[in-house]
Image (cartoon, rainbow, N blue to C red):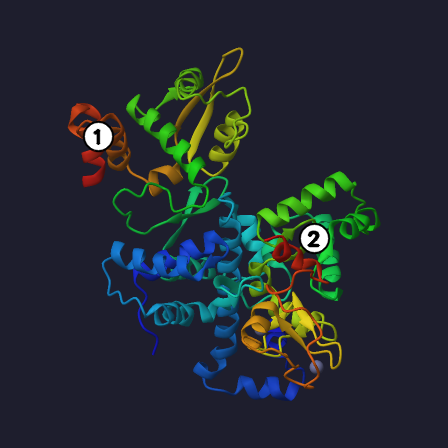
C-alpha cells in the first residue's frame, strides 16, 4: 500500500480513499505500472551483467527488484519473456542449487557463424578449437592432454600469449566463469589435475553438428569421416 | 501499432549492443547481413524504419537505439542507450568507485575546457586528489587507457576528449548536469564538446558543422552575431591555435 502511494506520488489520504472506490481494473493500473517498471529494471540489470557473461545470482536479481517485493516470480518470468521477444536472449537457470542464471543467445545460428558475433573474435576462435578438441576426444579431456594439444598450435599455457594473455587463466577462469567450459578437479591427484567438458553456455550457443562441421572443414574431410562423432552430432540435432 | 520484430531485428540489436558503438556504414552492412541470415524483407534505404521498429519495442524498457554524429569527422554512429538512468550505470558495473571518480573529474575538465580536450598531465594531477582513494599516476594512466579501449574517452597526442559513444549515451546526463557550461552546437543543436567558440558572442559549433557551414566562404562570419569568425577553419589552417588542429597541420 505505502509503495503504491509512493509510486504515484500521492500523499493526501483523500486521494488514496478515492482510489479504493475505483473499479478493479482502474485500481490495478498503478500496480501494473509498477510491475512494468520492475520488469524493465530487471531486464536492464540482466543486460548489463550479460555484457561480461558472468552468471547472475538470484540474490542480486532480488536486490534489483526490491527485497520485499512479493511478485518476484512473475517479474522474473516477464523479464525472461521480454528478453526473448525483444533481444532473442534466453534467461536460463544453470544451477538450481546455487540459483544462478545466464543469458543465452537464442537466435538460429547462421551457416558458418560459430559463436562469433562477439567483438572478441580471437578468443572465441580459441574457444571453438578447445570445444572441438573436447568433443572429438569423447566429450571430456584431461588438462594435460589439452595443454599438449594447444602447444601444437603454438599456444603455450605457461607463457603470456600476444592475443590471449594468460591462456591457462582464460580457459580455467574466464571461459569457466562464463559457463563455456566446465572445469572440474580430478579427486586425489597431486599435483591437481583437471577435467575439461563443455559448459551449459557452449551446449546452448553452439552444437556438436556445427563443431564437427568446423573440424571437417579444417581437415578438408566430410563430417561422416568421424563415424561415432557424426552419429552423436546427428542424434543431438534430431533431439 | 508497432511492427513486429523478426529475428533480423533481434540479431541487429544484439550486435549493436555488443559493439558499444557502430559506424553508420557498418550498421548498413549489418542491416543487410541480418536480413539475409533471417530471410526477411530487405531494402537498402529502409535502415531507419528497421531501427524504429526496434525502438518501438525498446521504448517500454526505457532504452533506445540512438544516432549521433562524430565530432571529429562528422560521420553518423549508432549506440543503444539507456534512457531511464541519469547516472553512469553501464559504467557503474564495470568500474570501481575510484575509477568512476577519475572519469567524472576527467569529464569535468573536458567539458569546462575551451576546446573540449583535457591534457593527460592535468588529468594525472587529479589522481592523488581523489576522495574515494588516492591513485598513483601509473595506475591512473592505466585506467585512462582502459577508458579509451572501452570507448568512453578518445585520445589524441596526449589530449583526451569524450568518445562519440560517450556523447551519444550521456548527452542527456551532460546537458542536465552541466547546464550552465555544456554548449549546444549552433548549427545542429546537439551537445558540442569539441567545438569552436565565437569570441564575440560565445556560441559554439562542431568542427564538422563549421566546415560545412563555412564551405566556400572567403570571409566567414558568425551565424549569430555576424562578426568575423575568429577561429581558424578546421582542416584549412597551417598553424592551429587549438590543440586539436595539430593532427590536421601534421597531415
Ligand atoms: Zn553541430
Ligand atoms: Zn558570434
Q: Nearer the viewer, residue A57 or A82?
A: A82
Choose top left, top right, bottom left or bottom right for residue A143: top left
Q: Is residue B176 above or below residue B246?
A: below
Q: Position of residue B176 (x, y in %)?
A: 67, 73
Structural distance between the alpha carbons of marks 1 and 2: 57 Å
Residue at label 2?
B159
The 10 Å Cα crowd at callout 1, few under 14, some 14 to 19, many 20 or more, is some
Q: Position of residue A50 (x, y in %)?
A: 49, 49
Residue at label 1?
A232
Q: Nearer the viewer, residue B206 or B30?
A: B206
Q: Nearer the viewer, residue B78 or A215?
A: B78
Q: Is residue A34 left or right of residue B155?
A: left
**Residue occupying the point 84% across, 50% down:** B129
Q: Is residue A67 visible?
A: no
**Residue occupying the point 35% across, 75% down:** B2
Q: Ligand 1 near label 2 (Cβ, under 8 Å)? A: no
Q: Position of residue B88 (x, y in %)?
A: 63, 60
For disc 2, the chain is B
**Residue occupying the point 54% across, 75% down:** B215
Q: Nearer the viewer, residue B226 or A116?
A: B226
Dot 2: what SS?
strand
Dot 1: what SS?
helix
Q: Is residue A35 above or below residue A177?
A: below
Amino acid at each position: 500500500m505505502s509503495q503504491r502511494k509512493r509510486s504515484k506520488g500521492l500523499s493526501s489520504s483523500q486521494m488514496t480513499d478515492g482510489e479504493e472506490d475505483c473499479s478493479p481494473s482502474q485500481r490495478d493500473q498503478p500496480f501494473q505500472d509498477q510491475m512494468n517498471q520492475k520488469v524493465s529494471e530487471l531486464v536492464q540489470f540482466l543486460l548489463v551483467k550479460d555484457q561480461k557473461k558472468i552468471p547472475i545470482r538470484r540474490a542480486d536479481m532480488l536486490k534489483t527488484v526490491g527485497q520485499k517485493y512479493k511478485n518476484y516470480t512473475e517479474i522474473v518470468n516477464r523479464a525472461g519473456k521480454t528478453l526473448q521477444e525483444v533481444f532473442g536472449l534466453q534467461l536460463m537457470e544453470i544451477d538450481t542449487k546455487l540459483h544462478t542464471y545466464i543469458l543465452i543467445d537464442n537466435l538460429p545460428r547462421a551457416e558458418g557463424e560459430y559463436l562469433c558475433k562477439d567483438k572478441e573474435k580471437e578468443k572465441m576462435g580459441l574457444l571453438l578449437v578447445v570445444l572441438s578438441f573436447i568433443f572429438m576426444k569423447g566429450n571430456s579431456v584431461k588438462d594435460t592432454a589439452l595443454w599438449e594439444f594447444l602447444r601444437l598450435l603454438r599456444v603455450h599455457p605457461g607463457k603470456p600469449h600476444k592475443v590471449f594473455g594468460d591462456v591457462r587463466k582464460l580457459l580455467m577462469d574466464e571461459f569457466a566463469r562464463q559457463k563455456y567450459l566446465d572445469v572440474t578437479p580430478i579427486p586425489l591427484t597431486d599435483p591437481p589435475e583437471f577435467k575439461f567438458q563443455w559448459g551449459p553456455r557452449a551446449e546452448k550457443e553452439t552444437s556438436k553438428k556445427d563443431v564437427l562441421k568446423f573440424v571437417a572443414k579444417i581437415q578438408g574431410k566430410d563430417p561422416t569421416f568421424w563415424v561415432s562423432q557424426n552419429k552423436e552430432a546427428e542424434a543431438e540435432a534430431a533431439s | 501499432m508497432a511492427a513486429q520484430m523478426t529475428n533480423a531485428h533481434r540479431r541487429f540489436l544484439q550486435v549493436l549492443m555488443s559493439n558499444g558503438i557502430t559506424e553508420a556504414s557498418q550498421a548498413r552492412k549489418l542491416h543487410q547481413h541480418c536480413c539475409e541470415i533471417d530471410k526477411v524483407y530487405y531494402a537498402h534505404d529502409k535502415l531507419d524504419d528497421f531501427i524504429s521498429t526496434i525502438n518501438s519495442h525498446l521504448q517500454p524498457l526505457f532504452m533506445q537505439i540512438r544516432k549521433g554524429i562524430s565530432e571529429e569527422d562528422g560521420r553518423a554512429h549508432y549506440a543503444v542507450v539507456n534512457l531511464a538512468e541519469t547516472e553512469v550505470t553501464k559504467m557503474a558495473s564495470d568500474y570501481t568507485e575510484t575509477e568512476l571518480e577519475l572519469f567524472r573529474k576527467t569529464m569535468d575538465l573536458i567539458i569546462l575546457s575551451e576546446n573540449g580536450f583535457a591534457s593527460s598531465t592535468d588529468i594525472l594531477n587529479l589522481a592523488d586528489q581523489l576522495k574515494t582513494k588516492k591513485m598513483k599516476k601509473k595506475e591512473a594512466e592505466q585506467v585512462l587507457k582502459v577508458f579509451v579501449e572501452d570507448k568512453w574517452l578518445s585520445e589524441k597526442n596526449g589530449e583526451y576528449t569524450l568518445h562519440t559513444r560517450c556523447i551519444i549515451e550521456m548527452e542527456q546526463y551532460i546537458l542536465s548536469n552541466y547546464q550552465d557550461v555544456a554548449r549546444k552546437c549552433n548549427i545542429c543543436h546537439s551537445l558540442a564538446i569539441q567545438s569552436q567558440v565565437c569570441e564575440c558572442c560565445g556560441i559554439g559549433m562542431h568542427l564538422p558543422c563549421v566546415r560545412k557551414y563555412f564551405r566556400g566562404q572567403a570571409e566567414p562570419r558568425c551565424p549569430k552575431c555576424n562578426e568575423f569568425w575568429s577561429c581558424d577553419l578546421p582542416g584549412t589552417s597551417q598553424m592551429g591555435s587549438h590543440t586539436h588542429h595539430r593532427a590536421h597541420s601534421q597531415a
